[in-house]
Amino acid sequence: MSDVRTGHAPAAAASRAIMPAKDMAVIWVLLAAAFVAILNETTMGMAIPHLITDLGITPIAAQWVTSAFMLTMAVVIPITGFLLRRFTTRQMFLGAIVLFSTGTLIAALAPGFAVLLGGRIVQASGTAVMMPLLMTTIMNLVPAASRGRMMGRVSIVMSLAPAIGPTMSGFLLDHFGWRAIFVVVLPIALVAMFIGWRWLTNVGDTTRAPIDALSIVLSAFGFGGIVFGLSQIGGLSSGAAATPMIAALCVGAVGLGLFLWRQVVLQKHDDALLDLRVFCSRGFSLSMAQMFLLSLAFFGSITVIPLFLQDALELKALEAGLVVLPGALAMGLLGPLIGRVYDSHGTRILLIPGSFLAASMLWFFTTLTVDSSIWVVLVAQTFLSVGLALSFTPLFTASLASLTPRFYAYGSAVIGTIQQVAGAAGIAVMMAIFTAVTNAGGGTEVPAAVAAGTRTSVTLGAIIATVTIVGAFLIRKPADELEETAAPAAH
């Protein structure tokens, strides 16, 4: 046991780390599908001005192309834990990729905005399943001694797809129009569908518990109401009425409370849609708290910094994208190396420097002015991404490894849900602060006002990131032997 705690896996664990080729094939298929889904998720932001012109819609309506996608993800992800236990790997993958491909086709052929919006919702329904399915499969197939390295590959998908998405989108928009985004993604999705249909095998066991319709409804009102309410915060500084936001947040809070109560009742009979007993694991709970704070600080900050680059430093959109690209590439490419370090030495050697680095760079961003060097911002953004890479990979791995196999699917669903809600909250609050301060200084046409808005909003992210330094000292890697001998997370 002491060998594991000090990071030196025993020989038995090393031998188990060799995976059969068919298991690796399953993971590679899921990695490819997740990459396509996340790539698609990040392409539409740049298309909004084109949609406004081509479809004759308002900016508020066009924003729903991304808002509806995010809302659908927030509603579907919480129920994936149950679905992954109820249906086989093949059924879930093929169902998800068929939904994604169908939504892509609908969007590509959409004659108007309403059909395009419907296509995006169908796309999101499939996308929401991909990451929980991937992480649950990894936990079921990959030996404990190699999980960090495999989660490092997941980090590549989660980092490179968002990095490539806007650049690819910009090229296609400039040369072919917004429909080309879906036309390019569709054949890739169809190839992934064929490969999965032909070679994907089932992983893990399934249950026959009935699907609780009331839980689905409560989940939709709870998570959907909260995410929608948070998305309305940014409009308050522009004079929008607060009533829709307050109503949505109230509906979300009530719905979420009833959903959680319903799950506590159902999990007594193993019928819960989202089994909350995962939080009985101290390691999982600490990891989720850390991930919530990191997502809150990270997603808000990476939304504000590009605005600073374009409106305060007066860069073009492509130039701003190139400034943040090295950080995204570094975050992805370091994933496998970070995973190996996790497998050998555990969490603290990664989380502690990672949290210090991320917090330090966010505090640095609070000093930005119109005279700041583009190259300095590029270096700081890259170091921020490295700090986050040092944090997310061990958190993904340690959190799920703290659970027994029967809870992997629920743990994956909780991770996805927390990232969605925390990301939406971070973006909403920090954008609201940014907009309010910027407007008070004269608007986005005044570079100094944009710089002031950036400094004020990123200060919140820096404060939150500083708290994660404490959490970095508390989270530990579960011992490899616990995979077979530990009691369940809860009885």
Image (tube, rainbow, N blue to C red):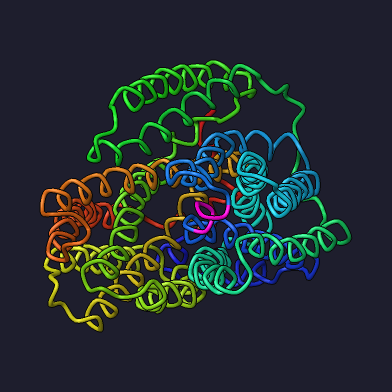
Q: Quadrant of the C terminus?
A: top right
Visible in this render: residue 8? no
Give the residue displayed 28% in from the left and 26% down from the top.
242
Residue 95 placement (x, y as % from top left): 77, 44
Above or below, 490 relative to 268:
below
Q: Nearer the viewer, residue 375 or 364?
A: 375
Q: Is residue 476 above or below residue 145?
A: above
Where on the picture, by quarter, is residue 207?
top right
The answer to whether residue 251 is left or right of residue 441 is: right
Q: Where in the figure is residue 174, as x and y percent of width and height?
A: 55, 72
Residue at x 69%, y 63% (from the top left corner): 185
Q: At 58% across and 63% down in the image, what residue appears?
A: 39
Q: Seen in the image, is 376 located left or right of residue 327?
A: left
Viewer can see residue 138: yes
- The region drawn magenta spans 50-54
Q: Nearer the viewer, residue 375 or 151?
A: 375
The residue shown at (38%, 75%) is 327
Q: Is residue 94 left or right of residue 423?
A: right
Q: Is residue 53 magenta?
A: yes
Quarter of the view holding residue 25? bottom right
**Measured from the top left, where is residue 339 in percent x and y?**
49, 70
| Residue 430 horizontal/vertical position (percent) | 25, 49
Q: Nearer the viewer, residue 64 or 94?
A: 64
